Image (tube, grey):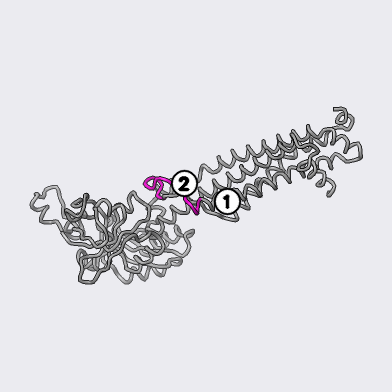
Amino acid sequence: MKAEFYIARRFAFKPRSLSKPTFIVLTAVVGIAVGTAALILTLSIVNGFASVIEGKLISFSSHLQVRQPDERIFLETRRDLQTLKSVPGVATVSPFLEMNVMLRSRAGSGDAGGNIVPAMIQGIDPRVSSRFLQNGPALLEAASASAESPLPILVGKTLARKLGVKAGDRLMIVGIAAKNGASAITGSESVIELLSSLDLHVARVAGIYDTGLTEGFDDIVAFADLARLQRIYHPGMISGYEANVSDLSDLQSISANAAARLGYPFYTYTVYERYANLFEWLKLQQNIMPLLIITITIVAVFNIVSTLLVLIIEKTREIGMLSALGLEPRAVSMVFMGQAFMISLVGIGLGNLLALGLSLFELRFHLITLPEKSYFIRHVPLEIDPLQYLAVSAGVAALTLLFAFIPSRVAASLRPSTALTT
């Protein structure tokens, strides 16, 4: 076996002339390197993109929400909290209160001052708010607040830009006074009755956060302290419970178990169900992967097969001489299989280095930018996974050796008399 690999190395990397064989081998190595790097980078981008967007969605919301039909508010009870906490797999549980309101900025605070923007204020536990800021978005601005100050709210970057406000500015919350947990607006009400039902309160921008999730997130959602929001609008009432689980892979079964334990009128839905359209979009991105892998594989296969066939033509006389000296057809086949292995090994190594270098360079300098409004991120995300590099390398090597069998059998079938006279 050592003799076959020695001959293979001489054929591949130490030809007698420095013309065609060297150029052919170099082309094959470069082709395999580029194909390997392209495949690794494609997987890194697709997986990184899915990981970043999924992470943002999950950090923005809880893993699981418990509500009542028609999103009506209800009384918070210790029994419901204890029931949810007792569900296997549930890590944390906290109540929340959601309100659809209009926010109005103070007139004259800037070019956009005085704007009225629809928003949803979500009252959450302060401990949940701190975890939200630690694990998810960046806090761009912050202002100190006291118990006597107007209701402090945390607004998104896009919402703050629409309102023309900064941390510390005051806002007017325009809500509708509720009757028995429902909106007071009916079609038969007069304008005077409608105006009298408006519930006006002053709020203060305690901070501005930025998740990069522009549409439906940073442009509409504001966060406030649950206890203070309840005191102003609905004492003791909540919109539901939020729960995080210890293992996301069991989220669906935990959700079903929680709904069964709580019973009617409660129902549960997961973050994947809440943002189903966005997660389907991510799946669509990942569904392109098989097509890319097949395309790159076909290119790599034709590359190695054509290279070996050209080398066989170039080395026909040498093959005939080796056969005349007693080298068996099986050994001749192993020579070209060894060539394929060495060429692929060098190409795969260079491809891994190229992919890693480009990935680190992009992660460091962020040269490729994306429209954040469409993709929810500013720069191309890359996920460097050693197992992914290993899997791609093993796959390329296996395919190279598999399809190198055809030209190696062609070389083994050459007769010495025919090869020496060619």
Residue 420 at what x, y percent from top left? 88, 30
Front in this rendered view, residue 387 or 187: 387
| Left or right: 332, with 118 as reference point | right
Residue at which label 1 appears: 357
Residue at which label 2 appears: 368
Residue 246 at what x, y percent from top left? 46, 65
Please determine whether, in this image, residue 266 is positioned above or below residue 344: below
Magenta stretch containing residue 360, yes or no? no
Locate the C terminus and report the quarter of the image it occupies: top right
Report which quarter residue 80 is drawn in: bottom left
The span shown in magenta is 362-377
Q: Residue at x 34, y 50 (%)?
A: 214
Label 2, label 1: how many angstroms apart (C-alpha)? 15 Å
Report which quarter residue 171 is drawn in: bottom left
Residue 293 at what x, y percent from top left? 58, 42
Q: Residue at x 48, y 62 (%)?
A: 247
Q: Residue furthest right?
A: 325
Residue 248 at what x, y percent from top left? 47, 60
Circle 2: residue type: Ile
> Callout 1 environment at 10 Å: few (<14), some (14 to 19), or many (20+)?
few
